[in-house]
Each structure stands twice: as C-alpha cells, then as structure tokens.
Image: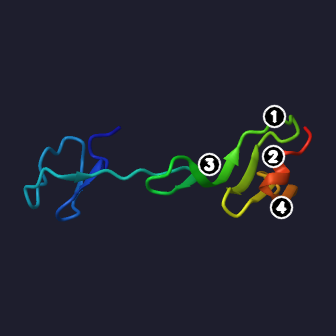
Amino acid sequence: MDNQETWAKCRECQTELTEKDKVCPKCGSTSKIHELSAFDGLIGRETIKLQKKKTGEGGVYSESIDGWFPSGDPKLTEGVYQSRTIDKEKDTYDQIVKDAKTGELLHEEHMPLSEHKNKEK
C-alpha cells in the first residue's frame, strides 16, 4: 500500500488519513475509523436461529431457523435457503427450502409437530 493512500478517517473531523498519520493533522485526534469495501463477486451468506424459552421453565418451546445451508445434493452446488419454524406450544412444524441459486421451491411442509415427529423416515 502506498503511504499516501487514504488508510482511515479521523473519527472526530472525518479528515482522510494515511497510514503514517499517528494523529489527525487537522484536529489532533488519535481516534480513527477504518472502512472496509467488498468487491463484486463476494457472496455473503448468513443464518439466523432464534429460540424462545419461558423464564423459570426448562427447555425451548419455539425455534426458528432462517438462512443459507450447504446441500448434500451435488446438483445444488450453491446450497439452499431454508426457513423452518417449530412451535411445541402451538404444535406446528413449518419448513420451506429453496435453491439458493435459482430461488426455485424445492420442498414445503406445514403440519402439526406431533405428526412430523411420528413420520416414517
């Protein structure tokens, strides 16, 4: 990296700083902000998992998972997006699975949780 390139910004006055700047030449602050840029072609994948529990009672009574997952199917090289909600109190099981590359619906299931648990595999 060229020492004259912008390396950070001063947190106080937003002056652009180079890597050699230990203090801001404008305001004297040593606090810096570093910015990160993403390049075209990077793929961000995330998954969120939520669990509901009641205070004073053991165990999870509701769970939701939503996001990207790898697939064991060699045809689904980009993985799948899955949305699944399990609610023991309401006795519900809901699941939607889509191809991460095309968005095509691969699997959809809505049923009582008690029936899903007893399904033959």
Q: Distance between the residues labelled 1 and 3?
A: 17 Å
The residue wearing badge 1 is 72
> Residue 105: horizontal and vertical position, in percent?
86, 58
Q: Residue furthest left?
A: 28
Label 1 or label 2, whichever lies nearer to me, is: 2
Say few, some or many: other residues with alpha carbon within 10 Å of mark 3 (under 14 / 14 to 19 / 20 or more): few
Q: Which of marks 4 and 1 is nearer the N terminus?
A: 1
Q: Residue 117 carries which label?
A: 2
Label ID, residue 110 = 4
Q: Which of marks 3 and 2 is in front?
A: 2
Q: What residue type is labelled 1?
A: Gly
Q: Residue at x 76, y 43 (%)?
A: 79
Contact between labelled residues 3 and 4, with CB atoms less than 8 Å apart: no
Q: Distance between the residues labelled 1 and 2?
A: 22 Å
Do we see residue 81 in this rendering? Answer: yes
Picture layout, residue 40 above or below residue 27: above
Disc nearer the start of the sequence (4/3):
3
Determine crowd level at label 2: few under 14, some 14-19, many 20+ residues with C-alpha closer than 10 A: few
110 or 46: which is nearer to us? 110
Question: Looking at the image, is mark 4 or mark 1 nearer the viewer?
Answer: 4
Query: Tag on residue 45?
Result: 3
